[in-house]
Image (cartoon, coloured by chain):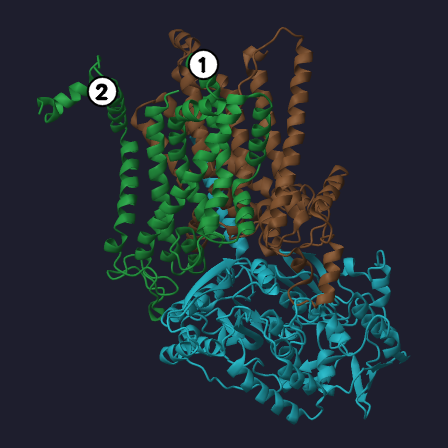
Amino acid sequence: MVAISAPTPPAPPRAKSRAARWAKILGRELTTVAITIFGLLLVTFLIARVMPIDPVLAVVGDRAPADVYDKARLALGLDKPYWQQFATYIGKVFTGDLGTSVLTAQKVTDDIKTVFPATLELATLGTLIGVALGVPLGILAAVNQGRWIDQIARVIGLIGYSIPVFWLGLMGLLLFYAKLGWVAGPGRLSVAYQDFVTPVTGLVMLDAAMQGEWEAVIDAFWHLILPASVLGLLSVAYISRMTRSFMITELQQQYVVAARVKGLSEWRVVCGHALGNAFVPLVTVIALSYMHLLEGSVLTETIFAWPGLGRYITNALLNADMNAVLGGTLVVGAVFIAVNLFSDILGRVADPRAR
Amino acid sequence: MRHVAKLMAASAFAALLASAAQAQTPKDTIVMAKQIDDIITLDPAEAFEFSGVEAVTNLYDKLIGVDLAKNNALVGELAQSWTVSPDQLTYTFKLRPGVKFHSGNPLTAADVVYSFQRAVTLNKSPGFILTQFGLNKDTVLEKVKAADDNTVVITVSKPFAPSFFLNCLTSGVASIVDSKLVKANEKDGDWGNGWLKLASAGSGAYKVRAYRPNEQYALDANEGWYKGAPKTKRIIVRHVAEPASQRLLLEKGDIDIARNLSKDQLAAVKSNANVKIIQGDKGYILYLGLNQKNPNLAKPEVREALKWLVDYDAIEKNIVEGTYKGHESFLPKGFLGAIDDKPYKLDVAKAKELLAKAGLPNGFTVTMDTRSVNPITDIAQAVQSTWAQAGIKLEILPGDGKQTLTKYRARTHDIYIGQWGPDYLDPHTNAETFAINEDNGEDAKSKTLAWRNAWDIPDMTKVTQANVLESDASKRAAVYGSLQRDHQKVSPFVIMFQQIEVSAQRKGVDNWVIGPSSDTNFYAPITKN
Amino acid sequence: MTDHATSPVTWHAWLTTTSPESRRQAKLGQLYRQWLAFRKNPAAVVGLVIVLALLLLAAFAPLIAQHDPLAQALDQRLLAPSAKHWFGTDALGRDIFSRVVYGTRVTLVIVMLVVITVGPLGLLIGCAAGYFGGWVDTVLMRITDVFLAFPRLVLALAFVAALGPGLENAVIAIAFTAWPPYARVARAETMIIRNADYISAMRLQGASQMRIVLKHVVPMCVPSLIVRTTYDMAGIIIIAAGLGFLGLGAQPPIPEWGAMISTGREQIFDQWWVATFPGIAICVVALGFNLLGDGLRDVLDAR
């Protein structure tokens, strides 16, 4: 869960023109991205192929007679050698064609267009909750370094790392939905609102708001809040911990001492100066945590019957729905890589040595 | 701080709003929670899963149907009447006049011919239900003919028992589709299959409003249905995987009907005055399949011993009460020729004796592929514990449904625990799969359950096959009776239970009747006050 | 017998002396000072206690559990917690407390197996990449990136699906997804060591590459990997439970906590105890490892 990699340290500056250096960096990063995505697809393909699940079953069901079964197998191209299947697939990916899912009978690209916003919605609110709780907690811990507040913040953070998300989700449903009735149950919208909202962006709350369906907005919010909080708690741990360490570094700097000497209030010193300077690395951390919430949503979506990307991939996997698995993995992988790249570049831009 | 207080007040208010909004489902709409992730398609020529067939039966009409109130007697639907020639080869159907499709197109004999042609030409999973009568893509236009706009004549290849043929016409694959509409949505000669996966083109009680796979389907009433407009304007069937969630949604009034409650949920809702429970016998049989490729399981004494080692009563009472009942023969209750014999019960001493006779006095180790769903896993574990009493070490291999099925179909399992549901309302469907194995080779054309368990039975195959030509129903039933008693003794199938389908509904929801198969779960009569 | 061997005060002095007389004394002294630092951190001590308790529970499970964790009693299913069944019973009438206690063994087995697979794998890949640099580094790190770009649970899920269910396969699957961070740590460490004078000296003496990597580089990376491992244990436990929860981990009737939660899902709203207690067990153990790892990191890995 905490396999978050630190941004790689920037290369030492060389005596070259700035533009050339940037072009070189960009070129190298892009090659890396291309290779990584290719590797990702290859690994996914291999796994899905050795899996002892017959993809034809998802097309024809269990009770199909032999001739029907054989026909479906041919139609999927499963009689061809693996390398040929993979080559065909890669060729299509380059033209933007991710194929058709056997489970939903829709184009994988269309499927992803509907499921990805659902996950995005969840991860975004989750991250917002994580930031809203994690950053203040981290600051508090840093300001009170070594004191009991710091200890408590640390333990809270570690608790966040220690709770299995699926269990927390179940307990949340038990308590806040079944017993207290504060939030809505599994799913994205109550049935009554299902057909009121026409998907435009795919983000239900946004769509409903744009269409003036305020009741639906509220309904969507009460469906979203519990799973998002469960996810948010996961990121509180990471965000608060990183905030703490950045802030401690900043608070030891000369300028902080200077600001204090100038007689600025502690509040302005901490929030104005130190936090301002810790801002860039913090954004990187938040981006990384965002990315991991996309991943953490696999189990959350199962518990909350949330029609998102995590559930889509898992379901496709267990049905050997190859195109859907590959397409979904491609999207997640692309997001991972994009976020990593973003944090790398941000690191370089912000680092005075690279400037 | 003031902001926080404001925010809290606002959210408290919003919570009130939300709980008020949650209270009820719309008046003219029935909302059902059901596990519908098994649906592959809504095309009647292709749908063959429990949920898919149930949807199809509410979207399309067939020539013939069954009357649930009259012990499943055959009745005319789109066919007002029919006659059978004395040689039992030719059937003549007179169509009901004035029936219209959802599109407004009139339903004629040409649509019937097209529908049959389409089903046997596409020849998807349920296609064999029609092709077994000699209809195929080359012969169908000779064998299914429109004599005039209102008359269809069908010729079958052998003098089959008329009840067999007519029963097969009640299954979803024989649904009549709107030929004009389907042709208009054809793509690359697919007979409209791609389009019909997600839409409907029928004359049935409902039409598809929207279908999102794995999520929900919404149906709108067909006001012009020939039997009269359905009582409820809209039906929404929503996929809810967890029985516990279904129950909660039901008790909170978020849904009107919950379809997949388990034993414990049922016990819990029984005390709720706002909920009532209805049930119907389903034809699904829960059994263990013992692969005869395993040398231990191939011993007749071992097969019998394992049947004595299941605590049928305890499992029924404690794990599946209200959702399954004890049943030890391959024809489900309600089918022609079904018997109620239950020769086996838990008898460890007898089993040990049999195992000793088989040369395995200390038992053996064997694996069982088990879907990770309840009650399957719980039943498997209960079986595991009684088998252990006779020294048999049962190793449970958990897996997802598709995983275990893949192994089962490849005959690489030892034991498979699973369900079998009849394909149509004639005893031949189960007799065929449990008691026919034409060719036990790896590349056999017909891969019945007997084949999957590598059970080579040339004699039983002949008897079973001959019985479909028996036109005297009582004789036919008698043969099935003796066949099943034989089967109980020697077969590699430990048949344990028959499913009871249970549905829990809010008070005020009435007239919802569960039929004996998915083909007969009709939404049209449901009312709601 | 010397005096200081019996007196703790003298022990303390001997260990904390600023002028150790032997290498061993220096080493022990360093350990002792680290222990003192560790002891000052109450959270870390709590973590240590939890982990020790876990080990004890696992070792003495038969003495602590009052019932056979596998014994079914179908007429006693779903009983609420009571004096006889502290945590109640599950859907097959098995005692949940006993199952939770025996579950410690399952958890420990998973964790240990993963650690002994992942450690060497990550170490080898990381050290090779860091030591040889150049194209070896590029290739190995690209592979690492590919694995890092996967959602970890999905990857584990795929592996289990490919390998078939069972505890061993779950372990292999987790190991496959857990090594990349170890490889990164080992690589970073190696890049520092590689340029150390004594390594260059050895190279000049003509030691084989293999020998240098295995005998000198790898051992230097081990301490930071141990810290990383302790820290990762919680993650491993949670992923394993996640697989069990999805029905792809341990085979029934093995009392694996994740699978126990999964079976309790159906009764969650009425018989809350079935899913609650195994979940608490996971939380406590994971927290124990996290606290311990956190404390260890502060002490050992000050960088």
Of marks 1 and 2, which one's residue comes earlier in the chain? 2
Chain represented in cyan:
B
User: Can residue B157 be seen in the rendering of this structure?
Assistant: yes
Chain represented in green:
C
Q: Work out whether B500 lies above or below C297.
A: below
SS of the residue at dot 1?
A: loop
Q: Are marks 1 and 2 on the same chain?
A: yes
Rendered image quadrant of residue A91? top right
Say what amino acid the circle numbered 1 marks: Gln
Q: Residue at x 37, y 51 (%)?
A: C278
Q: Colour of chain A?
A: brown
Give how far across and how far down residue A292 sits, in percent: 53, 36
Q: Work out whether B5 lies above or below B353.
A: above
Give how far across and how far down residue C115 sits, in percent: 41, 38
- In whole angstroms, how far apart are the C-alphas of marks 1 and 2? 31 Å
Foreground pick, B176 / B443:
B443
